[in-house]
Image (cartoon, helix red, strand yellow):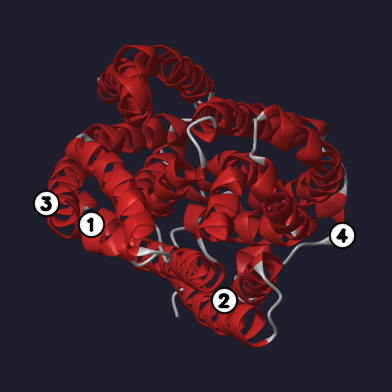
Amino acid sequence: MEQTRDLTQGKPAGLIIRFALPLMLGSICQQLYTMVDTAVVGQALGVDALASLGAADWLNWMVLGIITGFADGFSILVSHRFGAKDQNELRKTVAMIVVLAAGIAAILTAAAHLAVHPLLLLMNTPSNIIGGSLEYLRVMFSGIAVVMTYNVMAALLRAMGNSKTPLFAMLTASVVNIGLDLLFVLVFHWGIAGAAFATVLAQISSCLFCLRALRRIPALRLKKQDWKLDSFTLFSLIRMGVPTAFQNAIIAIGGMVVQFVINGFGVTFVAGFTATNKLYGLLELAAVSYGSSVSAFTGQNLGAKKYGRIRQGIRVAVWMALLTSLAITVFMLIFGRHIVALFVSGSQEEVKAVVDIAYQYLSIMAAFLAILYMLHVHRSGLMGMGDTVTPMISGIIEMGMRVGTVLLLPKLVGSFGVFFAEVTAWTGAAILLTVMFYVRLHRLRKMEWEMNR
C-alpha cells in the first residue's frame, strides 16, 4: 500500500476525490459502529439507556474535539514540511508532536475524570439517566490516551497524503467494535459500560494498524537528535494546535447548553434528540472527508509554493461538497424516519413519540446540510494555509449562535425551536469562514503574480 502521496503534482480534482473517498468509507465504518452502539443500547436496554447515551454525548464530544483539534492542528505543520520535502524538519516535527500529545493526553485524562460528574449535574441531567451517563463516560475517559494516539497517527498519515491506511484502520475498528458490542452488552450483560469498553478496545486495534503503516515510511525513521526539544517547532505546533482544540471545545460548550435545555423537556425528548444526533456523523461524514482532503492538499501546495493549485482545488471541492450534500439531503428526507426507528424500543406509543421527535430534527438538519458542507471545506482550506485563528473565531460564533437560538427560540415556538440551534450555528460560522478564505486566497494570488513577474 502507498504510504504517502504527493498532492503537489497531478490534477486537483482527481487527487481530492481519491484522497476523500477512503476517508468517506472510513467515516461510514465509524458511523456504522456508532449506530450499532446506539441500536444495541436502545434495543437491548431501553429508552432510559438511550437517553443516558444522549446526555453523555456533548461531554464525550468535547474531549474528542479537543483531541482531534490538537491532532489536526499539529498535522498542518507536517503537511507544510512534507510539501517542502524537508525531511529533517519533518522528523523533528513528528518527534515534538509525540512529546506534546503524551502530555496533553495525561492532563486531559485527569481533568475529564474530575469534571465529569459536576458537569453532568450542571447540565440538568435527569436523575434516572445520570448514573448511566456517568458509567459510560468514566470508561470512555479512561481511554483518552488511546484516542489521542489513534487521532495523531491518522492525522500524520493524512498530512502526508495517505488516506487509505486510516480507512483500513477504521474498518478493523468497526468489526472489532460491533463484535464486542454484541458480546459485552447482549452476552455478558455489562450494560451501557459494555458499549464504552467495546469502543475503547476497538480504538486500540486501529492504533496498531496505523502504527504499522507509519513504521514503513522512511522519512519518519526518527533519530536520536530529533528528540531534542526544539522551542521553535514546539511553539509552532502549539500555535496551530491550541486554536483548533479551543475551537472544538467552545463548540462543545455551546452543545452542552443545548443539552441543558433539552434535558428540561424530559426523557422522551432526550431520546429522540439522541437518535438523530447519532446520525449527525453520517450527515457530515462526506464534509469531514472533503475537509481533510482540502487541508492536506492546501497544506502541501502551500509548502511547495504552488498557490494557483490551491485555487483550483478549492473550486473542485466546493462543487463536490454541494452535490454530495444534496444527495444526502434527499436520502434522509425519504428514509430518515426508518433509520431513526432502528435506535428505539419500548411500547408502540413510546416508540412513535421518540421517532416523531427524531425525524423532525433530522429533516431540519438535512434541509440545510449544504451550509455545513461549505463550512467544512472553507474551514479546512484556511487551516491548510496555516490559519487556525479564524476557525477558532468561527467556533466562538457557532457557540454564540447555538446558545442564543436554544435559549430564545423555544420561548417563542416551544421545543421545536431547539432544532434550529445547529442550523443557525452553521450559518454564522460558514459566512465568516467563506469570506476569510477568499480574502486569504486573494493574498496568495497576489504573491503568485509577484513571484511570476
Mark in front: 2 vs 4: 2
Mark in front: 3 vs 1: 1
Identify the mark at residue 207; answer none if there is no mark: none
Q: Residue at x 66, y 80 (%)?
A: 184
Chain-order first, disc 2 or disc 1: 2
C-alpha gap between disc 3 and disc 1: 13 Å
Chain-order first, disc 2 or disc 4: 2
Give neighbour class at mark 2: few <14, some 14-19, many 20+ (Cα, 10 Å).
Answer: many
Q: Are marks 4 and 1 in contact (CB under 8 Å)?
A: no
Chain-order first, disc 3 or disc 1: 3
Mark in front: 2 vs 1: 1
Q: Which residue is mark 4?
A: 224
C-alpha gap between disc 2 and disc 4: 37 Å
Locate residue 111 relative to residue 161 in the image: left or right: right
- Of residue 126 and residue 443, the one placed in the foreground of this image is 126
Identify the mark at residue 337; answer none if there is no mark: 1
x and y percent of residue 118 in the render? 79, 33
Indicate the secondary structure of the residue bearing disc 3: helix
Q: Quadrant of the N terminus?
A: bottom left
Identify the mark at residue 330; answer none if there is no mark: 3
User: Is residue 19 visible to us here?
Assistant: no
C-alpha gap between disc 2 and disc 1: 25 Å
Chain-order first, disc 4 or disc 1: 4
C-alpha gap between disc 4 and disc 1: 57 Å
Locate residue 259 relative to residue 71 in the image: left or right: left
| Dot 2 amino acid type | Asn
C-alpha gap between disc 2 and disc 3: 30 Å
Q: Which residue is mark 2?
A: 177
